[in-house]
Amino acid sequence: MSRFVGPSIRLALPLVAVLVFAILLIFSLQRMFEVERDMRVEAEQNMLWVFHQSEVTALRLIETVALAELGQTGPDELALRFDLLASRVALLNDGPQRRFLEHVGLDEDLDSLGASLDRIALNIETFTPDQATVLRQDLTPLARFFGRAANTSMIAEWDDLGGRLETYRDQLGQIILSLIGIMIAGGILTVTLFASLHQSRQKNRMLWRERDFSGLLISSSGEGIIAIDSAGECTLWNGAISSIVGIPAEKALGRAPADIAGFFDMSTIRQALSEALEGQTSSLSFQPFFSPDSERPLYLDVSFFPMRNEAEIVGAIVFMHDASDRYAAQQKDAQDRDRLEELVAERTQDLDSALKRERSAADLYRNFAAMVSHQFRTPLAVADSALQRLIRRGPHADIDEVAERAGRARNAISGLTRLVDSTLDAARLDAGQVGARRTQYDLTEIIQAVCARQRDAAPERPIKINLDTSAAPTAFCDPAHVEQVIENLLSNADKYAPAGTLVSVSLNGNAKNLFCDVHNIAAPIPAHDQEKIFERNQRGANSAGVAGTGIGLFMARALARMQDGEVTLQPSKNGITFRLTLPRYTPGAS
């Protein structure tokens, strides 16, 4: 308890000085406001001018009565002068002027003179030269009253001014004394402030000496040791930590660790320091420290402990140890393990790649066989039909007919050649080996060529072509793949349509895409089969009794999607419509 008595006594004098300073300042300000208020000249106190003007008005009225008696002025001038006098009397009876008259004891005289104004007013209204003498006698007391009142007002104002000056002198003396007191209190505060600063410097010097002494005690430790106070500033920095960080103690003490080296600004180190200052112990292993003098970092083990003074946490202490050799040994073990895992992964990847290549080859051959069985029938049928007719005609066929039949067979064989190339490309693309070759192409040429071949293969099936000529039908596509898709859709429409019914092929589009719709009159496809029919080797319930492999629609959609297109089943009330969607060609497309 005694250690707090000295500081309390030292604080009492500055507190008293501050209190006196505030009281005197408030008192001085209050007195100055009072002086400023009293120095104002109030309008109601300037009565000398009012009484003088009233006296002048009364004398002029008396003069006007004399002139009226001589016939030199009229009743209007007399009435005007009386009204001016009456207004002066009314002014004296109003507000602050009345209060002043009461203050100097002239209010009763004014009341008696005011009563005589009624009689004077009557005489003014009925004025005749014979009444001039009586009227002057009635007005003379008014003039005398105003003169006497002016003298009384002047004396009262001089007395009031003298009283004010005495009051001002007293108040100014009080203000001067208060200012002297304020200066004394300010001097006390100034002296106290300088004394406090001097004591603070002395205590700081003593604290630094104690810290330096503590640093000498642990400077021989092989571990780096840092002490941090509750404000987060370094108070201890031994030689071992100087050799690790490369910063001497004189540059580290009194600074925050994060300002000393970037190592202490790492999030993990900052968090551990904060936890130590909150009373928690923690350790971090293999923290990298990058020294500007070394290309390779040091790896440090760092431990954080709170420093306590009884129950109070006064700071934290940090121990740092160079663990680079142990870290290097662990890294070597980890690298050996990683290298072994990489070798195993490489061998596994090689085996997976070989297995994928084997599966891709098998899929290529399987898909190729399926596509050959499905796609090559139409061109072979066209070529076979043309050659059979040519054989049957024999010597009866003329040169033009032979050329026509041979041309049809040759076109069918050319289409078969393109189909082989397209089929191989599709199989390779399905195996992830090639891509579609897209360019600009007129879809009307493909549609007309495919429909011509289909008419040759199935002459009994009427095929109608509807082309929208309002916009250029140029698509950005692979012509061989598009030809194969339309041929699949047209062959499919012929296969599932009743004999003799019409199959139509329509071409239209919008600003972005072209649509090729193939429509036939056939039984609708059940809803549960509408997506199933586009899968490989899948056929709908309406395909019973119709030859097929279930590969056509799968191939059509796959080939369309290779070129950013699509094959979909469109809703239709009368028959079935499959739509091929392809992007329009735009300049710069690739």
Image (tube, grey):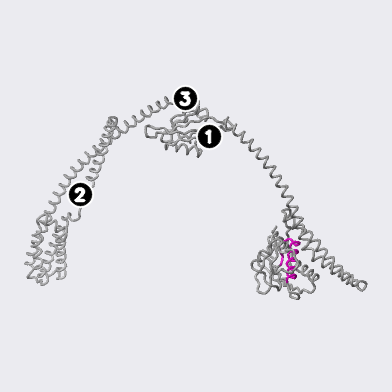
**Quadrant into which the N terminus falls:** top left
Q: Which residue is mark 2?
A: 38
Element assignment for label 2 = helix
Residue 219 image label: 3
Q: Position of residue 495 (x, y in %)?
A: 75, 70
Query: Sequence order check: which comes first, mark 1 or mark 2?
Result: 2
Closer to the camera, 278 or 21?
278
**Which residue type carries mark 1?**
Ser
Amino acid type, residue under disc 2 in the picture:
Asp
Quadrant for residue 31, please give it: top left
Please report whichever mark, 2 or 3, sits nearer to the chain's N-terminal start: 2
Give the quarter of the figure containing the C terminus. bottom right
Whole-Å distance between the Cαs marked 2 and 3? 77 Å
Q: Which residues are magenta?
A: 473-496
* Residue 166 lies in the magenta stretch: no
Task: Name the residue tied to disc 1.
Answer: 285
Give left or right: position of 258 versus 163.
Answer: right
User: Residue 121 appears at what percent x and percent y?
Assistant: 11, 69
Dots 2 and 3: beta carbons under 8 Å? no
